[in-house]
Image (spheres, helix red, strand yellow):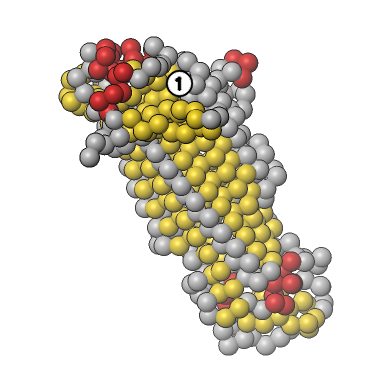
Amino acid sequence: MTQGYMIGEATARGVAVTALVPPADVQGLPGVVTPEMFGAVGDGVANDSTACQAAVATGKDVFFGQKYNIDGASSPRLHVTTANQTLFGAGDESQLLFAHDVTGIKINAEGCTVRGLRITGNSAGVAQFGIGSTDLAGGVGANSLRVDSVTFESLATAGMILFNGAIPLLGPFVTNCRAHNCGTGFWTLTEYGTFVSCEAKQCGTGFEIEAGNVLVAACYAVSCTVIGIRIDAGGNDGHGAVVGSSFNHNAINISFDAVINQGMPIVGCNFYGAPGSVRVGIAGAGALGARFIGCAIGVPVNVGLNSRAVFTDCLWPVSPVAITIDATAAVRFDGANVDLHGQLSADVAAAAATQTTAFVNQLQGVTAILPAVVAPAAPAAGYVLYIDTADGILKAKASTGHVTNVALPA
């Protein structure tokens, strides 16, 4: 049976459909060129850099059907400057190998697409990117970029970086991509972007989300040595969301850093696996607007200096989970936060909703909340929360007898 590849689009009765074309016919397609037309060998050994760039420079769609050694130290190696151009291949067998510290594919045009390629670096460089994208003067740049079914591997700095420059880069859409053994898997400094069904494995940082208005959905980061996903608005809006994603067995599973002015919901995500943690405002003090909704959290939580966080209807599958809150942080636990060893007291959740800072360490250790009293007895385990009638402060008394002030009067 002849194997086919998805090539471009055709139109039948006004409905866009994808044409399935055998590889032998690729060179005969109008508007499509291959590096072989310009002298490429495609064996992964011969230097095909000049031939590959010549194919890209035609402005036509380029089909990479083999393995191409794209050698040379000048950056970028393949420079896309024609709007709506597509670089595509047949999956992991269509491989671009970059040996130097370069940006492999740089996009400086609108409406472009990269799909079905395997982009491989040398693991050793200090400035090596698989795909780089920047805006141009006047905002005419890499808007509406599409990256689909691309594998990034062994790229020392990042699999891909989407950079906004002075003007926000609009609408990059990244789907079904994988980043393995990269410094950072997916790095965006845009204010708008979407990542769907992408995987980062054994990278330094899996997803680096800077600026805002970025949606990360159904994504996965595992065994990253620095952070699974880092949210750093850098002073911009924090709009966007992380939805239905898993961050497991990373050094830090998720980290909120610097200021996120308008909030960033984290919805239906999983965070588990040693040595991971959930960190809000630790590396960059003053992270604002981190809201965890319906998440499963099985790792320690740390909320740092002048930071804010809300946990609503979350599942805590490990009991107890250490929750450390800085004295200047503002943290709220709303709704039915549940652990697998028994639902947290509704009274505790209600009290937390009315306070600024609550529950230092071992949230699951809270055993009761008492009405206003002078000084309750120490519990057998965990903490007792109470409002001290002498000063109106919400306090936690531990089994050791130690008393901690956890919130000032509302």
At 39% across and 11% down in the image, what residue appears? 58
Q: Is residue 61 left or right of residue 283?
A: left
Q: Is residue 340 above or below residue 211?
A: below
At 69% across and 66% down in the image, what residue appears? 334
Residue 285 x %, y %: 61, 47
**Total tally of numbered discs in the picture:** 1
SS type, badge 1: loop
Q: Is residue 46 above or below residue 22?
A: above
Q: Is residue 264 left or right of residue 252?
A: right
Judging depth in this view, the residue of 25 and 156 nearest the camera is 25
Q: What amino acid type should be assigned to the residue bearing mark 1?
A: Gln
At 49% across and 21% down in the image, what residue appears? 84
Residue 258 x %, y %: 61, 43
Residue linked to disc 1:
85
Judging depth in this view, the residue of 221 and 395 nearest the camera is 221
At 48% across and 64% down in the image, what residue appears? 299
Residue 105 x %, y %: 39, 24
